[in-house]
Image: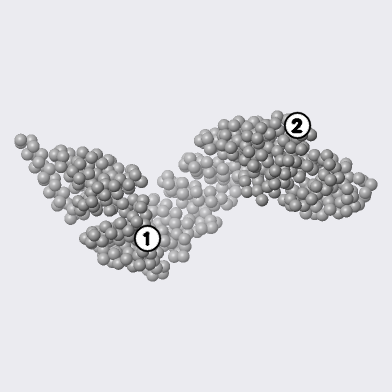
């Protein structure tokens, strides 16, 4: 069995070369009319074959062979027919019988070589083809199949050499030779040559769908997306109802995130065919990503009764409604997703979040608590419930639900990390540090845990060298994370390296401009560097940003200190 991409080529060879190599009319002339029974069965076989009844055609040919057992024409047709329907063992048998009767039968030798290639008997196939080419070096069909076999064996230079000889011969296979040359060069990563050969194939036959599609693929691989799109559109100008090409064009447009073109093209695709659920879903997601919520909803609603995953459709409709600001509709959608659905976990977490944001914290808690009774130890629900308990100022409940979950899965990094944060809020910092360490042991690149542990050390003023290493590692993984950048600046501040502290804290503020803690940290670094005017400015910014009233007195005191320091500096 062929497992390489050239399996397609061998099949195509049998379709274009073997089956059509000798026409029925020529074969009829070679069947002896004096053997009337054989001739009658042979005529019947031709009729059955022309009607697409290949099994019946094969039966008629076998009956004809009984009455004329040495007919080369009947054996040839039996071999070609068996090969065309994939019965290679039988095809080999008929081809060998024909060659035994007519040793110089090149057609059957080519058929037999194709059979060997199809069965992955590459050496035998090439040996037979070399024998043929030694007698007829310009035989186009032989060159064509030989090039294909070399390509299958990934001997690309030899395949290209042979196929170029085939392309240079006048005959029906020139177009296919150029087409195969394009495919061989593409698979050999010579995309420039692939483009050249495929364009030549297109010049010879400007109506072949597969050439346009392969050329579009070569353009895409070269980054010539506009040309790939043009290739698809050129074919659609000829064949506007070709769904395969329209789908390929749509995929290219989706990859390029050309949202308006995607929506327009999807509309044409819907006019051409009834059901394109997979593509429709991708289009809807792209619309969501680009804030075209009405378009996303329109597509999703049309798919609601045909798409195989109803829960997925409903979930993303909810997301669209939420982004539009229609929270009632979003919540109705999320509530309708059954608890056994694949997206039930995400749906209930999202619904709980929306309830909390609307001030319905008790309903959010009830929803997740009830969900956990139905499906205990569902991690995302445990984490959601811990967060909701924290919002309800119930940190002890948050700690207990996380500990209970860890009894079942003690090595879960996310549960360990969230427990570390809860313990820190409860003032149990030593235990929090141990939990964070365990989380990092389970996943050494866990950015949140690395940052938490490093920042906690900085807050405590301990292990500052280790804290710097931890946070630098986190920053190497997520270099544009404002909170991790703030942590590194804070470590430098704690180490008395104020210039470096200011550098990183300013960058953190640029990355997260609305965070009051980062602004306060930057103010502290300015104060330590006696840059009092800037300290005063960022403290005042922090006071505007802070939401918790309990944090405001501390900031007001810092503002007063900065004002006094600035005044004293002016007076002196």
Q: Is residue 39 above or below residue 170?
A: below
Q: Secondary structure at mark 2?
A: loop
Question: Can residue 135 be seen at all in this image of the molecule?
Answer: yes
Q: Is residue 171 above or below residue 98?
A: above
Q: By what rule are the colours in the image chosen?
A: one colour
Q: Which mark is residue 271?
A: none
Residue 322 locus on image (x, y percent): 38, 53
Residue 248 locus on image (x, y percent): 56, 43
Q: 1 and 338: which one is in front?
A: 1
Label 2 crowd (10 A; few <14 / some 14-19 / many >=20): some
Res 151 quadrant in image:
top right
**Residue 102 as seen in the image, left or right of residue 448:** right
**Residue 151 as seen in the image, left or right of residue 263:** right
In the rendered image, the residue lying farthest to the right is 34
Q: 406 and 38: which one is in front?
A: 406
Please tell me which of labels 2 and 1 falls first in the chain. 2
The residue indicated by pointer 1 is 412
Label 1 crowd (10 A; few <14 / some 14-19 / many >=20): some
The residue indicated by pointer 2 is 138
Report if the CB atoms under discs 2 and 1 are less than 8 Å apart.
Answer: no
Looking at the figure, which quarter contains the C terminus? top left
Residue 374 locus on image (x, y percent): 41, 69
Q: Residue at x 66, y 39 (%)?
A: 150
Q: Residue at x 86, y 49 (%)?
A: 42
Q: Residue at x 84, y 45 (%)?
A: 100
Q: Secondary structure at mark 1?
A: loop
In the rendered image, the residue lying farthest to the bottom is 373
**Residue 131 as seen in the image, left or right of residue 164:** right
Q: Residue at x 23, y 46 (%)?
A: 490
Q: Is residue 109 above or below residue 433?
A: above
């Amino acid at each position: 069995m062929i497992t390489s991409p050239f399996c397609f080529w061998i099949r195509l060879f049998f379709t274009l070369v073997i089956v059509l190599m000798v026409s029925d009319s020529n074969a009829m002339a070679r069947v002896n009319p004096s053997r009337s029974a054989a001739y009658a069965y042979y005529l019947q076989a031709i009729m059955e074959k022309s009607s697409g009844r290949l099994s019946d055609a094969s039966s008629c040919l076998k009956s004809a062979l009984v009455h004329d057992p040495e007919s080369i024409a009947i054996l040839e047709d039996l071999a070609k027919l068996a090969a065309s329907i994939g019965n290679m063992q039988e095809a080999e048998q008929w081809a060998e019988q024909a060659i035994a009767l007519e040793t110089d039968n090149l057609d059957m030798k080519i058929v037999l070589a194709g059979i060997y290639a199809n069965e992955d008997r590459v050496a035998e196939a090439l040996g037979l083809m070399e024998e043929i080419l030694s007698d007829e070096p310009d035989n186009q069909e032989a060159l064509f199949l030989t090039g294909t076999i070399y390509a299958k064996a990934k001997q690309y230079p030899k395949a290209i050499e042979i196929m170029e000889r085939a392309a240079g011969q006048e005959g029906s296979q020139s177009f296919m030779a150029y087409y195969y040359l394009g495919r061989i060069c593409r698979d050999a990563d010579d995309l420039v040559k692939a483009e050249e050969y495929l364009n030549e194939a297109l010049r010879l036959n400007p109506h072949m769908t597969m050439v346009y599609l392969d050329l579009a693929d070569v353009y895409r691989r070269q980054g010539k997306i506009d040309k790939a799109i043009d290739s698809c559109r050129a074919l659609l100008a000829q064949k506007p109802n070709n769904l395969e090409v329209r789908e390929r064009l749509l995929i290219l447009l989706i990859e390029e995130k050309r949202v308006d073109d995607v929506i327009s093209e999807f509309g044409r695709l819907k006019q051409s065919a009834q059901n394109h659920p997979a593509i429709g879903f991708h289009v809807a997601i792209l619309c969501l990503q680009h804030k075209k919520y009405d378009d996303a909803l329109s597509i999703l609603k049309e798919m609601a009764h045909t798409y195989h995953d109803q829960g997925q459709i409903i979930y993303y409709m909810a997301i669209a409604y939420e982004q539009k600001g229609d929270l009632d509709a979003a919540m109705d959608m999320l509530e309708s997703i059954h608890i056994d659905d694949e997206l039930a976990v995400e749906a209930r977490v999202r619904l709980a979040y929306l309830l909390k944001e609307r001030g319905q914290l008790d309903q959010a808690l009830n929803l997740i608590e009830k969900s956990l009774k139905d499906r205990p130890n569902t991690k995302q629900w445990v984490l959601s419930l811990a967060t909701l308990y924290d919002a309800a100022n119930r940190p002890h409940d948050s700690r207990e639900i996380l500990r209970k979950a860890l009894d079942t899965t003690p090595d879960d990094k996310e549960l360990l990390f969230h427990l570390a944060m809860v313990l820190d809020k409860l003032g149990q910092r030593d235990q929090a540090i141990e939990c964070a360490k365990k989380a990092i042991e389970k996943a050494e690149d866990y950015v949140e845990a690395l940052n938490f542990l490093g920042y906690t050390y900085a807050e405590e003023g301990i292990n500052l060298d280790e804290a710097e290493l931890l946070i630098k590692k986190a920053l190497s993984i997520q270099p544009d994370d404002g909170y991790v950048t703030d942590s590194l600046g804070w470590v430098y501040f704690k180490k008395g390296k104020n210039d470096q502290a200011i550098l990183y804290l300013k960058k953190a503020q640029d990355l997260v401009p609305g965070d009051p803690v980062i602004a306060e940290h930057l103010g502290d670094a300015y104060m330590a560097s006696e840059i009092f005017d800037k300290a005063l400015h960022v403290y005042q910014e922090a006071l505007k940003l802070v939401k918790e009233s309990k944090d405001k007195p501390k900031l007001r005191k810092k503002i007063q200190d900065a004002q006094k320091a600035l005044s004293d500096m002016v007076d002196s």
